[in-house]
Image (spheres, rainbow, N blue to C red):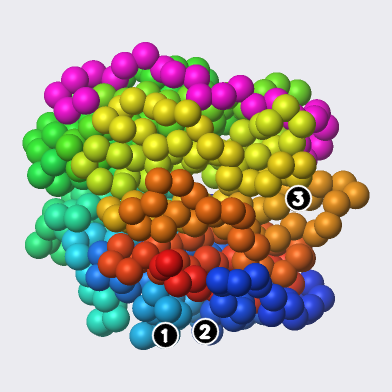
Amino acid sequence: MSLRTFFLAAALSTAAVVPAAAQADAPWSAPAALEGATTPSTGPLGAITARGTAALTASNPSTETAPADHPTQLVRMDAGGRVLASDGLSFVAQGVTTYGATGLAAAGETLGTQYPGTLDDTSRLVVSAMSGAGAIRSTTISGLHGFGVFALAGDPQGNVALLVFNTRERIVYLRKKGSSTFTKVLTIKVSDQARGATLAVGGKSGGELLVAYEDHHTLYARHRGTRSWGSVHQLGDSVQSDISAAFDGSGRESVAWKSQRINEGESNTPAVVSFTTAAPGRGFGARRQIESVSGPSGAGHYVSSPAVLLRVIDGAHTLLTWTGSDGTNFVVKAETIASGHTATPATLSPAGSDAVLGDASVAPSGAALVLWRSNTAGADATLNAPAPRVTAAYRAPGAASFGAAEPVSAATDQQPVLTGLVDPATGRAIAAWAPVSSAVQFATRPGN
């Protein structure tokens, strides 16, 4: 969750309460409110373990006059939606991930004391970890007052990495398998032009790090093996970028990003989607332009986050999804990258209407879920069109392609953050979202 998303929660606390319609199309279940989420609430963030335990969060609104005791609700459930545990966290969650076979972790900041109910320079950075539905153990990382979380990532071997930021630095922490301590492993000094950043942890044996960050309108990357960092790689032009990074099971590194200059909610330039990759032990290849996404100019028509996502399927395959264009409308596209080789993209969203990417999730079986907001022209709702709906495309285990679009939510105003999860064991899927004026909702789907 971004800081901006959290502050939106405070603004929404005065909004009129309008219950969301319990509506979804088969095979999705009827939407239900996430246990413990307030009305309204924001988020959600989520992750699902290799053993099928899912974690979903809701950010509960807080103000200076009424700060929330537990600004985040963390709910753990199985892939069928049965709640296993529900806990209030003392911080605003901004990242959720899995590690090992059963580990779950959430990271964020406590509410400050200088301006109660907000995130300020007195806020502390906390990481909470747990195994499945077990007890939660929280760690406060010293020296990080006023820092935010850019990314939290884990790998199958049990390592957890954290990327934090302020206006001057990007700092990477690593908690190795079997340890309870986060160790600072890299500090990046940045200019006042620095924007997005992300990281991945993994590699063939686990514990390797890849950090990608924007500064001076350029995207940079650094790789850390088991002991030391390599040199800085310049990947390509990058302006106000959304960035996604990944290791596949062979140790291949991949970075995808969307670059688009946005000024006061408007952009008159295309959104350029790019991709680059590095085979194990090799440097990054040349930037490949996946698409130059043009749309109508004017307020609300820039390509909103997350814009582009990489999701690792197995040792050789990674799913790339992004918000693209068919020449008339914004659409959601996907392609499977095999050992670094791109393929012909498929358009997942229906023709004749706008759609923007929300989230994607994959499993080693090939099962995959892609979520988007329909009737959304880049960032804002399409004029003179039905209200947006959370919509999904699902690929069954072992299938070669995605099925037809499946509406998941009612037609109503939705907040921009969506979360989609696929159970690696069964292929079952979970979608979660936040209507503007009600609690975080979720729905489930069978795996066939």
Q: Is residue 58 visible?
A: no
Which residue is found at the position 48% from the left and 77% from the top? 73
Residue 393 place in picture, x, y as percent: 54, 54
Residue 296 place in picture, x, y as percent: 80, 30
Number of marks in the rendered image: 3
Badge number at residue 293: none
Residue 156: within the magenta? no
Characterize the local packing of mark 2: few (<14), some (14-19) or many (20 or more) Cα atoms within 10 angstroms: many
Q: Which residue is mark 3?
A: 375
Q: Are marks 2 and 1 in contact (CB under 8 Å)?
A: yes
Q: Which residue is mark 1?
A: 83
Q: Secondary structure at mark 3?
A: loop
Badge number at residue 35: 2
Which residue is found at the position 65% from the left and 70% from the top? 25
- What amino acid is labelled 2 in the image? Glu
Q: Is residue 225 visible?
A: yes
Residue 286 place in picture, x, y as percent: 37, 14
Q: Which mark is in front, 1 or 3? A: 3
Q: Which residues are magenta?
A: 279-301
Q: Secondary structure at mark 1?
A: strand
- What amino acid is labelled 1 in the image? Val
Q: For marks 3 and 2, give the CA distance.
A: 29 Å
Q: For marks 1 and 3, give the CA distance.
A: 32 Å
Image quarter hosting the C terminus:
bottom left
Tag 3 or tag 1, which sits nearer the N-term?
1
